[in-house]
């Protein structure tokens, strides 16, 4: 028996034990999770940009953002 057959049988056994892995509901949960993760990553990047702009304006001796020549 090759490793592909063993892996396939193992995967089929897992799907038989957990039928929710093969349903559309599981896919929808994953999609909403990815949307939440993307939202929080964008939120954190926006907060970091706002903080950098605030720091740039209030502390001119330290340059966080690049200056134009």
Image (spheres, grey):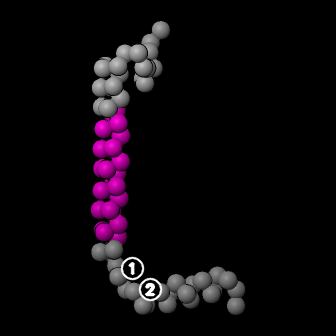
Q: Which residue is mark 1?
A: 21
Of callouts 1 and 2, the N-terminal one: 2
Q: Is residue 10 above or below residue 56?
A: below
Judge from the rendering whether residue 53 lies leftward or rightward of residue 7; answer left or right: left
Which percent across, then down, holds residue 21?
39, 79
Question: Mostly what secondary structure, the magenta segment?
Answer: helix
Q: Is residue 15 above or below residue 35?
A: below
Instruction: Pick whichever, 68 or 23, lies toward us.
Output: 68
Looking at this view, name the residue that lies furthest to the top.
69
Which percent across, then down, holds residue 69?
47, 8
Q: Secondary structure at mark 2?
A: helix
Q: Give me the C-alpha separation between circle 1 and circle 2.
A: 6 Å
Looking at this view, name the residue that lies furthest to the right.
2
Q: Is residue 33 above or below residue 43?
A: below
Q: Is residue 37 magenta?
A: yes
**Figure quadrant of residue 24:** bottom left
**Figure quadrant of residue 49:** top left
Instruction: Residue at 30% x, 56% y: name it.
Output: 36
Judge from the rendering whether residue 59 lies leftward or rightward of residue 16; answer left or right: left
Which percent across, then down, holds residue 23?
34, 79
The label on residue 15 is: 2
Magenta range: 27-49
State yes or no: discs 1 and 2 in contact (Cβ < 8 Å).
Answer: yes
Q: Is residue 11 above or below residue 53?
A: below
Instruction: Pick whichever, 35 or 22, lies toward us.
Output: 35
Q: Quadrant of the N terminus?
A: bottom right
Instruction: Residue at 35% x, 36% y: name it.
Output: 48
The label on residue 29 is: none
């Amino acid at each position: 028996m090759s490793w592909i057959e063993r892996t396939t049988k193992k995967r089929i056994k897992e799907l038989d034990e957990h039928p929710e892995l093969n349903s559309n509901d599981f896919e929808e949960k994953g999609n909403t999770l990815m949307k939440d993760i993307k939202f929080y990553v964008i939120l954190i990047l926006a907060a970091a940009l706002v903080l950098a702009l605030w720091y740039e304006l209030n502390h001119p001796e330290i340059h966080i953002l690049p200056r134009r020549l």
